[in-house]
Amino acid sequence: MTIEHDLRAVADALASSIPAISEEILQRSRAGAPNYYRRNDPMLLETELPSITGALTSIIHGLRHSRILPEGASEGALEEARAAAQTGLEVTDLLLTRRIGQVVLWNWILDTAARVVPEGPRRIAVLKQAAEYHFAWNDIITHDVVAAYEREKSAYFFHSRDRQRRAIVTDLLKGVPTDTEQLGYNLNAEQIAVVAWGNAARAALKVLATLLDAALLVVEGTGGTSLAWLGRSRMSESFEKHLAAIEPPPATYLAIGGPGTGLEGFRLGHRQAWQAYRVGRLRPQPVTCYRDVALESVVLRDIPAARDFMRSELGAIADGDPRSELLRETLRAYFATGQNAAATAVRIHVHERTVAYRLKSIEERLGFLINHRRDELAVALRLADVLRDATDSQLAMMGEHAPTETGL
């Protein structure tokens, strides 16, 4: 047997473990690099898993194919570096997560080699070759990641057209005293806060300001978002009057918080809009209002726990098959009508006896009476709506730490 043969055996075994290695890196990073997650920025967190899996795939490919080094960092790694720069994360915190990933992967390489390569000089030779490749790979990628970070930081913070406004808004959101006259915006007015993203974010905000006849303050956020506040007297009344008419351009989305008044309303509305945005990223709709997804935004702070809860409560009707979806639709309507079977039948356009049959079927599948866990089932159904179509990378963006995010 040759070293190349043994390295391929190690690489093949590692390839089948990429999901497990990725999960360990994520868990270790959350414990060992808290600053990376402190902002809880969805755009940064969304880049994390693709960056990790891209790195693992690249290294394993190199081990399998004569240790040929990559020409440069993957797009996933560069995208993470750019997002980190946009959020204001220190490059040392970004590199810390990469070092944690290196340690985790090297431990997997050691354990895997111990399983697939006989002990003795042969295994030592394999590990020496793997170590040399691993360190050389990291040198190349780290250089590119740091360069991408520095370029983005320079472009985003020093050449941005609204960098001065961004600095003022950042201070306001953090509670730092600052001169707000340069904003040209009345912070004392009643206002709503908005996070906009997609193809025509700024255009959508201008249209919204016109619709509400409101003053508009916009700054650039991370990952292509625009952060906005719209103020006027009697904003609540105007917003409720025009809510149904809010229609962003195609592939453009708005997350709305508030309304609120004064500086505290400015901050609270933005926190609410940001939480609505986090849910809206999982379930894209033209308009997501915080008041409609407040429950989801709290529960989804811990995605694994939320998913476990949803599956535990819905049990046999949590699957994606048509019958389960039909039963969930019936149960959702049943709760929405105050558990009135007749009203449920009208709502979903079936006979009342059909509703009774479906409810009985639900209870048989769940193994308990609906009324015994009404509140838990109602929450689980709402979570199912959000989590149903979310991708793994979208779910990975939802951090487990309490947010102090600004989106700036």
Image (cartoon, rainbow, N blue to C red):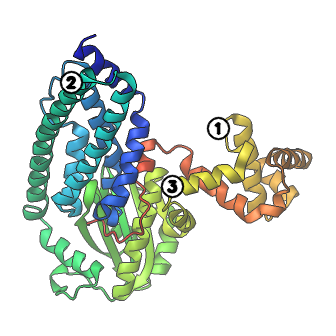
Name the N-terminal-most of marks 2 and 3. 2
Q: Which of 195 and 318 lies nearest the eye of the viewer?
A: 318
Q: Is residue 125 left or right of residue 310?
A: left
Name the residue beneath numbered marker 2: 125
Instruction: Find residue 277 and report its image quarter.
Output: bottom left
Q: Residue at x 50, y 59 (%)?
A: 302
Rounded to the nearest angstrom, the CA distance separating label 2 from label 1 is 49 Å
Q: Are marks 2 and 3 in contact (CB under 8 Å)?
A: no
Q: Is residue 391 above or below residue 288?
A: above
Q: Residue at x 25, y 43 (%)?
A: 102
User: Which residue extends farthest top?
Assistant: 1
Name the residue beneath numbered marker 1: 320
The kind of residue tagged 2 is Ala
Asked whether residue 29 is in view, the answer is: yes
User: Which residue extends farthest front?
Assistant: 120
Q: Is residue 234 left or right of residue 375?
A: left
Dot 2: what SS? helix
> Which disc is residue 303 wearing?
3
Binning the other alpha carbons within 10 Å of mark 3 as few (below 14), some (14 to 19) or many (20 upward) gives: some
* Residue 156, horizontal then vertical, whole percent: 14, 59
* Residue 47, horizontal then vertical, whole percent: 31, 47
The kind of residue tagged 3 is Ile
Q: Residue at x 12, y 40 (%)?
A: 139
The kind of residue tagged 1 is Gly
Q: Residue at x 33, y 54 (%)?
A: 29
Rounded to the nearest angstrom, the CA distance separating label 2 from label 3 is 42 Å
* Residue 144, horizontal then vertical, whole percent: 11, 42
Q: Nearer the viewer, mark 3 or mark 1?
A: 3
